[in-house]
Image: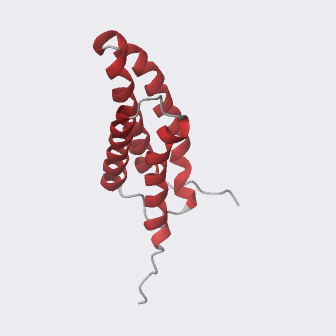
Amino acid sequence: MSEQQIDPRDEPAPFGAVVLLTVASAVAVMAVTSLIDEAPGLKLLLLGPIALVVFEVVVHEVWWQRWWGALPGAVLGLTLYFEGREALADVVGDSWAHPIAYVASWALFAVVFALASRYPRTLSA
């Protein structure tokens, strides 16, 4: 019997690595922005976590049909950020609401992305 060839691109995103690195990069971005005198731009706020997810996809050769989870992850992450930031502002104050909601939203994005990568989207032929 011949061994089946396993395409490495068909492997799901590594859950722990994607989530931990994305959260760590979000924490790093928040740490850097706290040291800057002026308000950070949107590019800086998105650069770290998105770069890490792209890096994980490229390094682990996650197949494009497994990337579909980025869309619901982004929607859920943005919803958590805006709704969570508003709710947290009442509890912990404005100065802490943004960093906590930012890190939590990126964590949710990474979890949804990594879990969704276990269920590839198929094209109907």
Q: Is residue 98 above or below residue 125?
A: above
Circle count: 0
Q: Is residue 27 above or below residue 91?
A: below
Does residue 73 appear to the left or right of 65 in the view shown? left
Q: Residue 120 appears at what percent x and percent y? A: 52, 56
Q: Position of residue 32 (x, y in %)?
A: 36, 40
User: Looking at the picture, does residue 99 appear above or below residue 32?
Assistant: above
Considering depth in this image, is 50 or 123 the residue closer to the camera?
Answer: 50
Residue under the point 35% across and 32% down: 34
For the N terminus, give its image quadrant: bottom left
Question: Outermost residue, top direction?
Answer: 90
Q: Residue at x 43, y 26 (%)?
A: 80
Q: Determine the residue located farthest toward the right in the rendered image.
A: 125
Residue at image coords 45%, 19%? 83
Q: Position of residue 51 (x, y in %)?
A: 48, 52
Which quarter of the image is occupied by the C terminus? Answer: bottom right
Front residue of this view, candidates 43 and 7: 43
For the residue pair 121 and 39, the one nearer the viewer reads as 39
Eyeballing the image, is 99 above or below 49?
above
Query: Residue placed at 42% from the left, 15% from the top?
Result: 86
One can see residue 73 in this view = no
Residue 37 locus on image (x, y percent):
41, 30
